[in-house]
Amino acid sequence: MRKRSKLTKQALLLVVMALVAAACAGDAANQTPETVVVTSIVTETVTETVTETVEVEVPAEDPFAGTEVTVFGPESGGAEEEAMRAALDLFAAQSGIEITYLGARDFSDQINAQAAGGNPPDIAVFPQPGKIADFAREGFILPLPSETEAVMNDNFSSAWTAFGNVDGVQYAIPTKADLKSLVWYQPARFEAGGYTIPESWDELLTLTDTMIADGNTPWCVGIESGGATGWTFTDWVEDLTLRMEGADYYDQWVDHSIPFNNPKMAAIWQAVLDLWNTPGAVFASGGSIAATPFGANGEPLVDGKCMMHRQASFYSAFLPEGTPAADGSEGAVDVFYFPSVGDDKPVLGAGTLVSAFRDAPEVWAVMEYFASADYADARQRFQALGKGAAVTEGVLSGFLSPNVNADLSLYAPLEQSFLDILNTADVVRFDGSDLMPSDVGAGTFWTEGTSAVNGDKTIQEALDAIEASWP
C-alpha cells in the first residue's frame, strides 16, 4: 500500500521556492524566455520513489514585477490548502506576482469583519453565493472587467457562472464544484450483509432498520465545523427538500417567497431528526452529532463502525490515506445516489467562487488564472499528489472543477462519474443555505439547526427563529 511521504509538505515547498527563485533570478531586461523544470519528491513506497515534474515558462519581460496579491479562503489545512498554494505558486512563478494565500475554517466570520473594517484581501474564495450577493450590493466587491468576464465565459457554462451574477452584473468566477447528493459506503460490507443499494427514500429507511436489526450501525453523522457548525444538517434538509417538495418549492423557499417556518419545512426537519434519533442508527465519534466534526466520519466508515455516510464528493479528501475507491477490493469505498422520493432524481451541488476587492491589473491577472483550465488542472494535480500518490493511479483528490476545458484524464474514474452526474442531471440546485442572505444561510440556519439537533429547541421554535432573522 502506498503511504504518504514525510517529505510531502517539504517537497511542495521546494517546488515553490525553486519556481520563485527561477522567476526572479537575473536581470529581467536581459533575460530570454526559458522553461524551468523542477522535480520534487512527493511520495515514496518501500521500493520506489515517485516524483512529479513541473515545467514553468518564465517570461523575458515581467510586467508584474514587484506586485503582490493576497487571496483568502475557507480551505485550511491538509491537501486542500497545500494544493491551493501550490497552484497559485505556479502562476506566481509564471507571472512575477507575489501571491499569498491564507486559509481559515472561520472564513465566513473573518471575511465579514475584514470587509466591514476596510481591510479585505485582494481576492476572496467564497463558498456562499449569498454572501457574494450581499457584498456586491454593499459595494465591497468589484464587477468583473469585460476581458476577465470573457475568459470566464470561455471556460464555464452559464449554469455555473450564474451563481456569481448579482442583479445582472458578474461579480465572481466559479473555481470548484461539489456534488452533494451522495452516500458513501463499502460494497464489500454491503455484500457481506446481504444489503442492496436503495432506490427510494422509503427503501433507505427500510435498509436503516434492517441494519440496526442485524447489529450494524447504519450512519456516521457529525455536524461540528467551528463557526460553521450545523451546515451538515442543512445539507440533509436541502437534499430532502428537493426530493420531498420539488425544485419549484425549493426555489421559493430559498428566495423567501414562502416563509421559512412553513409546515412543509417542519416536516422535512422532522424526517431528518427522526432518522438521526432512531436508537442505534448513528455512530458519532465525538459522543454526540453536534460534537462530532464533519470530517471525522471517514475513518469510522472505513473501519466498519458505520455502514453509510451522506456527504459531498469532496469527502474523499477526508478518507484515511490509501483508502481504495471503486476498485472491487475488500476495503474499497464507493458511492450511490442519495435516493429520491418520486420519479425525479434531483442533484444538490455546491462549490466556491472568487471575487475581487481591489482594482489592479495584477488582481485581474490572478482572477483570470482562476478562470483558466491551467488553474483547474494544476489544482487537481497537486491535490491528488497531496493525498499521497500520482494522479495516474486513480487517487480521489476531493476536488472537482466545473471548468469545461479541464483535463478529465486527471480525475479518477469515480470522480469522472461525479462530473458526469453534475453535467447531465435534469434538476440541479446549488446549496440553499449558500444562496440565502448570509445572516440566515451562514447564520441562523446553522445555529438554529444545531439547537434542534441537540434538542435545545423544538423544530418549530428553531424555524420561527430563522424566519424572524430573515433580513
Image: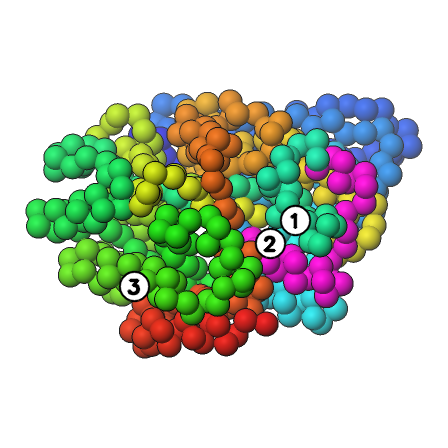
* Sooner in the amino-acid sequence: mark 3 or mark 1: 1
Instruction: State which tag comes first along the sequence, 1 or 2.
Output: 2
- 130 to 204, vertically: above or below: below
Residue 266 image position (x, y, % from top left) = 35, 66
Q: Give the mark, 3 or 2, whose residue is nearer the N terminus.
A: 2
Looking at the image, can residue 375 be seen?
no
Mark 3 near mark 1, Cβ–Cβ under 8 Å? no
Depth check, front residue: 112 or 463: 463
- Kindly give the residue lying farthest to the right in the view shown: 29
Q: From mark 3 to mark 1, how far is it between C-alphas?
A: 33 Å
Residue 102: image tag: none
Q: Which residue is mark 2?
A: 129
- Residue nearest the observer in this picture, 45 or 263: 263
The C terminus: image quadrant: bottom right
**Disc 3 versus disc 2: distance between alpha carbons?**
27 Å
Q: Could you tell whether 151 is left or right of 227 in the image?
A: right
Label 3 vs label 2, nearer the camera: 3
Q: Front-most of 407 and 180? A: 180
Specify the label residue 270 is tagged with.
Answer: 3
Disc 1 designates what residue?
164
Residue 181 drawn at (x, y percent): 39, 43
Q: Name the quadrant containing residue 322.
A: top left
For residue 82, what is the image quadrant?
top right
Give residue 300's position: percent from left, percent from top.
Answer: 25, 49
